[in-house]
Amino acid sequence: MGRDFYTSVLRPASQLMADHFETLMDKGLNEGEILEKRLLNAITEPDPGEIRCLATAATDAFLKIYGQQPAPIGIKAEQQA
């Protein structure tokens, strides 16, 4: 039973998540980009707009994986229901 659960649920979900993160990484949308710049002292502080963009992209990817669609900008989750 555990093997079936892993094979039919956990492994596909993990692969889907990995695929989405790979796509984000290919587009440069991951925290590693900011971390690398900080570690190399290329920037002293990340740009707030860049953080917002990366956080939004990561959140949208996470919600897409779990079957939720991101709310249009300016609409709260309560208003969508």
Image: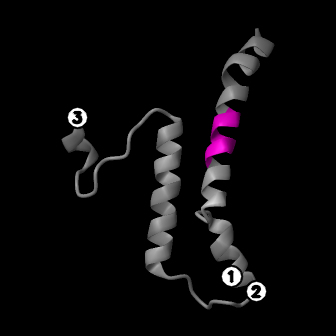
Q: Could you tell me how far apart the alpha carbons at marks 2 and 1 are, in whole angstroms?
A: 5 Å
- Disc 2: which residue: 40
Alpha-carbon neighbours of circle 2 within 10 Å: few (<14), some, or many (≥20)?
few
Q: Position of residue 4 (x, y in %)?
A: 75, 12
Q: Position of residue 43 (x, y in %)?
A: 63, 89
Q: Position of residue 12 (x, y in %)?
A: 68, 27
Q: Secondary structure at mark 1?
A: helix
Q: Quadrant of residue 27?
A: bottom right
Q: Nearer the viewer, residue 18 or 3?
A: 18
* In this view, 45 is above or below 70: below
Q: Quadrant of residue 3?
A: top right
Find the magenta span and give its range: 14-20
Q: Position of residue 57 (x, y in %)?
A: 49, 57
Tell me if residue 16 is in the magenta stretch.
yes
- Disc 3: which residue: 81
User: From the image, which quarter does the N terminus lie in?
Assistant: top right
Q: Could you tell me how far apart the alpha carbons at marks 3 and 2 are, in whole angstroms?
A: 45 Å
Front tag of 3 and 1: 1
Q: Is residue 42 left or right of residue 62?
A: right
- Identify the mark nearer the N-term, 3 or 2: 2
Q: Is residue 43 left or right of residue 57?
A: right
Residue found at x 19% / y 43%: 79
Tell me if residue 19 is in the magenta stretch.
yes
- Disc 1: which residue: 37
User: From the image, which quarter does the C terminus lie in?
Assistant: top left
Alpha-carbon neighbours of circle 3 within 10 Å: few (<14), some, or many (≥20)?
few
Residue found at x 53% / y 37%: 65
